[in-house]
Image (cartoon, rainbow, N blue to C red):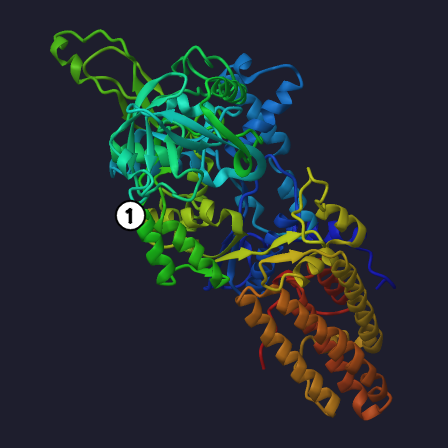
């Protein structure tokens, strides 16, 4: 055994050993395994590279799966990657722009070919990087959310919802990104504080005088169809039911009363622009107001805004409108104002809410399914504090806009009838029965005319397909062996920002399609921040590359450093000091092993995990400490308290074993009556400690185990060694 442990020499060799063994595949694990344990990797996007969040997440799952594998479970950890819809399309479009090419220049088919080229080049980057950290899922089962089998599952789910009456097509105000030219989810909008102006605008009253409205967006007044006040606001009670005029246009609109108006904002009177504001749209439903579209899909003012602003960008129109209002004496004042502006999380463009014809999934019954599953502990959200925000979101949930105007993703199984058609022979009277669209797996034929059905250009929100991950990856809707064996799964972990985006949606999807929640525990892990509490970000220069740390310290030290700081809090202020501590701990384990091997020399083959009996107080103390360490490790990992377990193991091995027992053993070994038994206990505690440490520090423990096997230990690879018995 070398005098020092060199992670660079050991890690690649050890990982090849694991891959060659095939033991990551539960079907290839030795022995009869009746108990099952399964976990799903949160599929990383094809656009990214490894960051600290990925590292924390996958190290945690790896720890749990490695222990279960050693405990004799048929343990499956299924990996995969997500096609990442808008994020991936943006990345490829950005790359094409460097060549002065637009996706429209290529056309949809050629552009999708470029997307698959990107996927082949970059799709597995994060998965390959995870290997550097020692993550060992069953790579043979790797899934991609656009695989043909997965796409079949997505179409099946859509058609199921549609036939149940839960998917519908309708006009709603959605978050629209003018750059991506698609709708995006509320959960994919990033809010940033920015300086603005709060304009106080005089709307002339039909009976003389004015009602003053406060807004940050005067340019949208050309789409106003009402002015609203709170019915309890005494300032405006006499004006309710009367009329005002939209400034500049002089178009007459009613003054209405609505409880949704905040009396404390601005003047207490608000303009209502139903086609470009979610709350205003809902107000228009309550009061039967018309909806005027004044901003198009590119963020340009339409002809509906009038000749005054048509063709201008919204920002340009805002300035021009403010100037004109000032000239007309209708701008009372413009105050400096800080507000939360909405931006597309993917490309950074400011969101333009707009009325759009989209596909929606009704959420009322699905939300109720999920609420019951969480309240009845069918799925435990851990830590428990996440239950409240999840339930609150579900209680106030809106129907889900599931369609996107992209070229990359799962196209809707919706087929639109050509607008012009010639009736089939003797069916002239039936042409009126031609359907506008058909939802179908395959291209339909019209029974009344010869027109073609054209497939919808829209694709599904990425999260619609990701919501099926725990069972679509196991072969659903087919009744596969994997599906019956591993569903429902036991454990999944993800960041808090996708609790509603992904975890909740997987729960209701599992309940709806499988009749069971998809996992017993959903672990919302901590967010890793910089040492001074800032968000890690490459663009801000505050990100830390885990692979650089692996290169510097070794994978086990990085795994140690991340896990050691993961003590169940909401955030981790990451410190490299913990990785340095991990590096020192690895050296301690290595040196302790060298001492035990030298003490035993040629007797290793005689020991082989026999249960020694204590002869001294020191013997008894270390065996009791080992028993406690075993119990704490097993119980702690089952509770997913990885950081607490590692602290306990660190203290046991460094202090109880090395500082106390190894030092005591030097005295006991001098006594011929105690020497052999002391060496047996040294070897017994070391080998069992390696087993307990293996899920956390897999490379060095496997390397040491390999050295012990070479020295005579009768055993297979540590990865499948039996977990220590609690005696």
The image shows residue 528, relative to residue 343, as above or below, that is: below
The quarter in which the N terminus is drawn is bottom right
Is residue 335 something that shows in the picture? yes
Q: Position of residue 23 (x, y in %)?
A: 59, 55
Please state which of residues 397 and 38 is positioned toward the viewer in this rendering: 397
Q: Position of residue 352 (x, y in %)?
A: 47, 28
Front-lying residue, 258 or 236: 236
Query: Residue at label 1?
Result: 365
Q: Nearer the viewer, residue 544 or 57?
A: 544
Disc 1 element = helix
- Res 458 → quadrant: top left
Classify 10 Å Cα crowding around label 1: few (below 14), some (14-19), many (20 and above).
Answer: few
**Residue 438: quarter of image:** top left
Looking at the rendered image, the quarter that the C terminus falls into is bottom right
Picture residue at 39% right of the left edge, 53% below the top:
392
Q: Is residue 77 left or right of residue 704?
A: left
Residue 328 location, x and y as percent? 46, 18
**115 lies above or below 337:** above
Q: Residue furthest front?
A: 208
Up-down: is 620 above or below 93? below
Q: Is residue 520 visible?
A: no
Q: Is residue 672 left or right of residue 147?
A: right
Quadrant of residue 195 within the rendered picture: top right
Q: Nearer the viewer, residue 311 or 673?
A: 311
Horizontal and vertical percent position of residue 100: 64, 14
Q: Is residue 334 left or right of residue 366?
A: right
């Amino acid at each position: 055994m070398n005098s020092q442990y060199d992670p660079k020499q050991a890690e690649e060799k050890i990982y090849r050993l694991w891959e060659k063994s095939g033991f990551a595949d539960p079907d290839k694990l030795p022995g009869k395994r009746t108990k099952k344990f399964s976990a799903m990797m949160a599929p990383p996007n094809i656009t990214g590279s490894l960051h600290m969040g990925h590292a924390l997440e996958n190290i945690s799952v790896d720890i749990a799966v490695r222990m279960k594998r050693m405990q004799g479970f048929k343990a499956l950890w299924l990996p995969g990657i997500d096609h990442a819809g808008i994020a991936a399309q943006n990345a490829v479009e950005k790359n094409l722009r460097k060549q002065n090419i637009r996706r429209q220049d290529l056309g949809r088919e050629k552009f999708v070919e470029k997307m698959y080229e990107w996927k082949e080049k970059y799709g597995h980057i994060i998965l390959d990087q995870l290997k550097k950290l020692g993550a060992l899922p069953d790579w043979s089962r790797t899934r991609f959310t656009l695989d043909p089998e997965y796409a079949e599952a997505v179409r099946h789910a859509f058609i199921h919802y549609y036939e149940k009456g839960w998917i519908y097509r309708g006009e709603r105000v959605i978050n629209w990104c003018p750059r991506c030219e698609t709708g995006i989810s509320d959960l994919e909008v990033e809010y940033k504080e920015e300086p603005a102006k709060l304009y106080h605008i005089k709307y002339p009253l039909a009976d003389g005088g004015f009602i003053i409205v406060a807004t940050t967006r005067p340019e949208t007044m050309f789409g106003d169809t009402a002015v609203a006040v709170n019915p309890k606001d005494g300032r405006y009670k006499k004006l309710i039911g009367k009329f005002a005029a939209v400034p500049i246009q002089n178009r007459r609109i009613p003054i209405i009363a609505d409880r949704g108006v905040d009396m404390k904002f601005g003047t207490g009177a608000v303009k209502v622009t139903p086609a470009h504001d979610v709350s205003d749209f809902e107000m228009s439903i309550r009061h039967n107001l018309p909806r005027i579209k004044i901003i198009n899909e590119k963020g340009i003012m339409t002809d509906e805004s009038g000749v005054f602003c048509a063709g201008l960008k919204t920002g340009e129109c805002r300035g021009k409108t403010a100037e004109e209002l000032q000239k007309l004496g209708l701008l009372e004042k413009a105050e400096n104002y800080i507000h939360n502006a909405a931006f597309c999380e993917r490309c950074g463009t400011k969101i333009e809410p707009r009325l759009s014809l989209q596909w929606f999934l009704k959420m009322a019954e699905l939300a109720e399914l999920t609420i019951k599953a969480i309240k009845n502990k069918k799925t435990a959200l851990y830590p428990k504090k996440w239950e409240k925000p999840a339930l609150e979101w579900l209680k106030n949930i809106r129907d889900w806009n599931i369609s996107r105007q992209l070229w990359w993703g799962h196209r809707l199984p919706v087929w639109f009838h050509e607008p012009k058609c010639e009736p089939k022979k003797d069916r002239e009277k039936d042409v009126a029965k031609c359907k506008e669209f058909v939802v179908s797996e395959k291209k339909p034929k019209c029974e009344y005319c010869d027109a073609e059905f054209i497939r919808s250009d829209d694709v599904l929100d990425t999260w619609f397909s990701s919501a099926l991950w725990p069972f679509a990856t196991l072969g659903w809707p087919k009744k596969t062996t994997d599906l019956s064996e591993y569903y429902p799964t036991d454990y999944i972990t993800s960041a808090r920002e996708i609790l509603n985006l992904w975890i909740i949606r997987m729960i209701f999807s599992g309940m709806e399609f499988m009749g069971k929640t998809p996992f017993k525990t959903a672990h919302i892990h901590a967010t890793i921040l910089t040492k001074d509490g800032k968000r890690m970000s490459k663009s801000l220069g505050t990100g830390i590359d885990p692979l650089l740390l692996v290169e510097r310290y070794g994978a086990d030290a990085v795994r140690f450093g991340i896990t050691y700081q993961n003590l169940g809090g909401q955030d981790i202020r990451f410190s490299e000091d913990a990785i340095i501590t991990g590096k020192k701990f690895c050296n301690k384990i290595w040196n302790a092993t060298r001492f035990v091997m030298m003490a035993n020399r040629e007797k290793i083959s005689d020991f082989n995990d026999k249960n020694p009996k204590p002869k001294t107080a020191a013997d008894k103390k270390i065996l009791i400490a080992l028993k406690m360490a075993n119990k704490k490790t097993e119980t702690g990992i089952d509770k997913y308290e990885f950081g607490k377990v590692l602290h306990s193991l660190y203290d046991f091995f460094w202090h109880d074993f090395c500082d106390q027992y190894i030092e005591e053993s030097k005295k006991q070994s001098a006594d011929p009556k105690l020497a052999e038994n002391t060496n047996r206990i040294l070897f017994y505690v070391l080998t069992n400690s390696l087993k307990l440490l293996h899920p956390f520090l897999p490379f060095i423990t496997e390397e040491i185990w390999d050295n012990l096997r070479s020295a005579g230990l009768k055993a297979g690879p540590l990865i499948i060694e039996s977990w220590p018995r609690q005696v």
